[in-house]
Amino acid sequence: MKVSPHQSLILNVDDTDAARYAKTRILQRAGFNVIEAGSGTEALEKALAEGPDLVLLDTKLPDINGFEVCRRLKQDPHTAMVLVLQTSASYLASPDKVRALDSGADNYLFEPIEPDELVANVRALLRLGRVERELRDMDRRKDEFLAILAHELRNPLGPIRNAVELLRSLDPHVSAAQENARRVILRQTDHMVRLVDDLLDVSRISQGKIALRRTPVELRTLLHTAVETAEPNVSIRKHNLTVTLPDHDIWVDGDSVRLAQIVGNLLNNAAKFTPPGAVSRWLSLRKTATPSSA
């Protein structure tokens, strides 16, 4: 069945002919395109085949009750986004409404339903459905943008690292300050490669499932790296950053990049929100346990 792009398709499910006819006529007069089903099995088949925007679903059906039909619709990835407005003329207790909503129904109405109330509820759910689709589309476009951005960001990182290695091979005997600058570039380039790799895995970012790569991490080295990252902001704001670290190694089991990000963010925020020229001890790591190598 072909549906006008300006019309919403409603699947009206009710085993009582008179009730089904009445609801269909109300919805058709309101401008909706309506198809019908008289059982739960038929409803599931038509929902899968026709792809309605909304299912008007009675709870009492001859084969599968409406709660189960709703649950199956919402669990099937092909019909999970179909809106379900559940109705009942026989289940009048509040727990049944809760049961319907727990099954995935988007709303629940008790019969008899006034025509205006039915149409208003259907329109309200369809508006919410349109907003949800728009948000999903925006999220998809964001994912595509991040994937393109990640590829574009990664392209120059390899040449940067290669250029530094070339400089090191062409002129291996440089001052300590120059060699330290080269090490900073290489370290921060590796850091950027790792962050861009995370961007490339758009699905993990969208689901908030950035994987931690846990290894033995020496905290003093990590903190020096974080301080290097934050140093430009500290200098611009004319702050005096004091770093107090123990003389011995301190090992932890963690993700070195994420830990460096955390400390770097703390330092950058401190530099940003502390009045210019302030003198404070921002970073201090003291011995809290016997250090051990992992």
Image: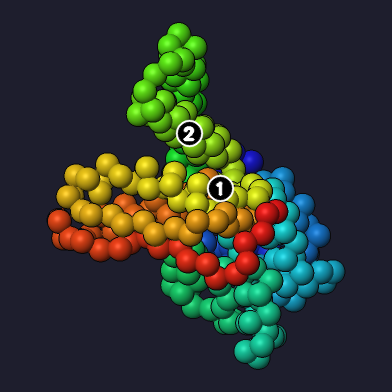
17 vs 215: above or below = below
Q: Name the residue under label 2.
A: 187
23 vs 1: above or below = below
Q: Which residue is drawn at 67% across and 84% down?
A: 96
Q: Position of residue 130 (x, y in %)?
A: 46, 52
Q: For numbered disc 1, what is the local secondary structure?
A: helix
In the picture, the quarter occupied by the N terminus is top right
Q: Where is residue 91 in the image (x, y as percent from the top left)?
A: 69, 85
The answer to whether residue 131 is visible is no
Direction from residue 213 to residue 197 in the image, left or right: left
Report which quarter residue 62 is drawn in: bottom right
Q: Mark 1 points at which residue?
A: 256
Q: Nearer the viewer, residue 159 or 97?
A: 159
245 vs 109: above or below = above
Q: Which amino acid does label 2 sit on?
A: Arg
Q: Residue at x 68, y 54 (%)?
A: 293
What is the residue that sits farthest to the left in this orientation?
276
* Marks 2 and 1 close (CB-CB < 8 Å): no
Q: Which residue is drawn at 36% across and 23% down?
A: 175
Q: Nearer the viewer, residue 277 or 120?
A: 277
Direction from residue 192 to residue 96 in the image, left or right: right
Direction from residue 93 to residue 126 in the image, left or right: left
